[in-house]
């Protein structure tokens, strides 16, 4: 089974994905690549950080399930190879989810959102994003919500981290029972 966790910047996708993997020993989190530099204070294993040249070589080698250029940087998910008995958890944007769908892969999509745009903006500022980037990401979030809705995503508001993780865990369990 493939589970896509998506949502606009600053809503806690990475933290939620990590907590889901800690809670479910049968989930395997695919680590995405990016050509952007790590943010100040960002965990160095949040992504595989590579040069734009290395990323482009991987594109040419058909190494990605999905990839996109976003705000001048490349982001991509290598073809996932989960250990036996594990479901794949992808933390990707909606454009990536569209690529997964185009490959004919059946997946559960959970779209994480902040309680309000103001909360999202504060979270973005808290991680060090400048005002221009905050405004771009808020605007991009509007588009992402529409795309996610069209993909049949289940929406979860991250107003309390523990509750959001529990809610997504219940969604995953229900999907597995289908």
Image (cartoon, rainbow, N blue to C red):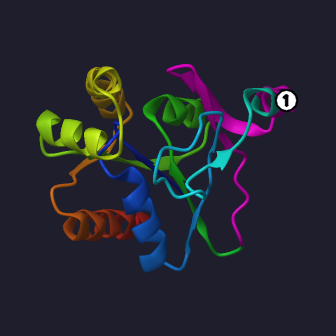
Q: Position of residue 108 (x, y in %)?
A: 44, 51
Q: Camera-side residue: 48 or 13?
A: 48
Q: Residue 111 falls in which quadrant of the image?
A: top left
Q: Camera-side residue: 138 or 3?
A: 138
Q: Residue at x 61, y 71 (%)?
A: 86
Q: Residue at x 49, y 44 (%)?
A: 39
Left or right: 53 in relation to 118: right
- The quarter of the picture where the N terminus appears is bottom right
- The quarter of the picture where the C terminus appears is bottom left
Q: Position of residue 75 (x, y in %)?
A: 60, 34
Please tell me whether mark 1 sits on a helix, a strand or a loop. helix
Q: What are the residue bounds of the magenta stretch?
A: 56-83
- In reply to whether residue 105 is colored magenta, the answer given is no
Q: Position of residue 91 (x, y in %)?
A: 49, 49
The residue wearing badge 1 is: 57
Left or right: 23 in relation to 163: right
């Amino acid at each position: 089974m493939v589970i896509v966790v998506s949502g606009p910047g600053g809503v806690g996708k990475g933290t939620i994905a990590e907590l889901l993997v800690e809670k479910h020993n049968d989930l395997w989190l695919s680590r995405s690549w990016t050509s952007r530099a790590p943010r100040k204070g960002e965990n160095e294993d949040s992504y595989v950080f590579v040069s734009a040249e290395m990323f482009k070589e991987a594109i040419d080698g058909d190494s990605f399930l999905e990839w996109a250029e976003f705000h001048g940087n490349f982001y991509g998910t290598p073809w996932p190879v989960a250990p036996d008995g594990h479901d794949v958890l992808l933390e990707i944007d909606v454009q990536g989810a569209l690529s997964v769908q185009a490959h004919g892969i059946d997946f559960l999509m959970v779209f994480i959102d902040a309680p309000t745009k103001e909360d999202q903006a504060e979270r973005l500022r808290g991680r060090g994003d400048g005002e221009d980037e905050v405004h771009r990401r808020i605007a991009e979030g509007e588009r992402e919500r529409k795309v996610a809705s069209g993909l049949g995503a289940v929406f979860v508001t991250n107003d309390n981290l523990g509750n959001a993780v529990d809610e997504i865990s219940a969604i995953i369990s229900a999907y597995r029972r289908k």
